[in-house]
Image (cartoon, grey):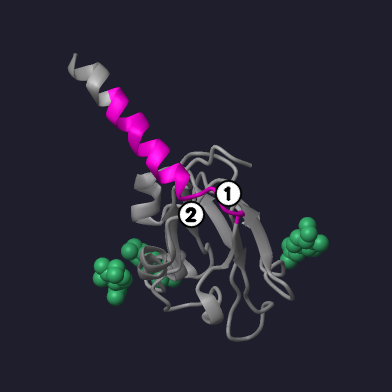
Amino acid sequence: MGFSYGSQGFILILVAVSLLALGEAKTVVVGGSQGWRYGFNYTDWTLKNGPFYIKDTLVFKYDPPSNTGAHDVYLLPNLWSYITCDFRRAKLVANATQGGGEGFKFVLNQWRPHYFACGQGANSSHCNQGLMKFFAVPWPRWHF
Ligand SMILES: *[C@@H]1O[C@H](CO)[C@@H](O)[C@H](O)[C@H]1NC(C)=O
Ligand SMILES: *[C@@H]1O[C@H](CO)[C@@H](O)[C@H](O)[C@H]1NC(C)=O
Ligand SMILES: *[C@@H]1O[C@H](CO)[C@@H](O)[C@H](O)[C@H]1NC(C)=O
């Protein structure tokens, strides 16, 4: 009984949240006018700019490599690697040059947590000290 009530409650929540998401998919520049850069608090940014929905697009904008450094975008495989900034099983989604111009576009088309982080710096310092990480769990939409 408890299980069935729980499932119904969950579905109701999904319906309620998805009704809010009937509008067009949105395109959001990660970090706003600051873009993807060292020292900006992306966890805080995510709290203020979420939630995100399936089919929304995140845009990563960053300068090409220079003597002041470079950035890139990885997806980390799970929560623990995200917490510890462990890139051993990470997947590169945008290299150091792909953030130029209009930026690198990532479409959130899967209903699962996405753990984004910058893989640059000795000892993953951009992720560890530079706050260049955040996660997004896009909500489903009924309507595409
Ligand atoms: C970043 O923002 C989060 C959420 O507002 C906050 O909990 C955290 O302490 C901030 N981190 C730093 C290093 O300021
Ligand atoms: C980054 O990826 C682009 C597109 O795949 C490629 O043309 C470019 O050579 C790559 N740059 C580096 C620094 O790996
Ligand atoms: C990386 O971290 C390890 C362990 O904390 C430390 O021994 C090493 O000196 C660090 N390397 C750099 C380049 O900061």
Q: Position of residue 54 (x, y in %)?
A: 55, 46
Please give the range of residues in magenta. Answer: 7-25
Q: Which residue is mark 2?
A: 52
Q: Which residue is mark 1?
A: 108
Image quarter for ligand 3 equals bottom left
Near-viewer residue (7 or 68): 7
Distance (Cα) linking label 2 and label 1: 8 Å
Dot 1 surroundings within 10 Å: few (below 14), some, or many (20 or more)?
many
Q: Is residue 41 left or right of residue 140?
A: left
User: Which residue is drawn at the image coordinates 23% and 18% (left, top)?
Assistant: 3
Nearer the camera: disc 2 or disc 1: 2
Q: Are marks 2 and 1 in contact (CB under 8 Å)?
A: yes
Dot 2 surroundings within 10 Å: few (below 14), some, or many (20 or more)?
many
Q: Position of residue 24 (x, y in %)?
A: 61, 54
- Prevalent SS, magenta region: helix
Asked if residue 95 shows in the view, the reply is: no
Near-viewer residue (84 or 58): 58
Q: Quadrant of the C terminus?
A: top right
Q: Position of residue 99 (x, y in %)?
A: 67, 70
Q: Is mark 1 within 8 Å of ligand 1?
A: no
Q: Amino acid at mark 1?
A: Leu
Instruction: Let me know if residue 18 is in the magenta part.
Output: yes
User: Which residue is drawn at the image coordinates 53% and 76% (left, top)?
Assistant: 32
Q: Amino acid at mark 2?
A: Phe
N-terminal of the pair, mark 2 or mark 1, is 2
Q: Residue furthest left?
A: 2
Instruction: Let me know if residue 74 is in the magenta part.
Output: no
Q: Position of residue 96 (x, y in %)?
A: 66, 68
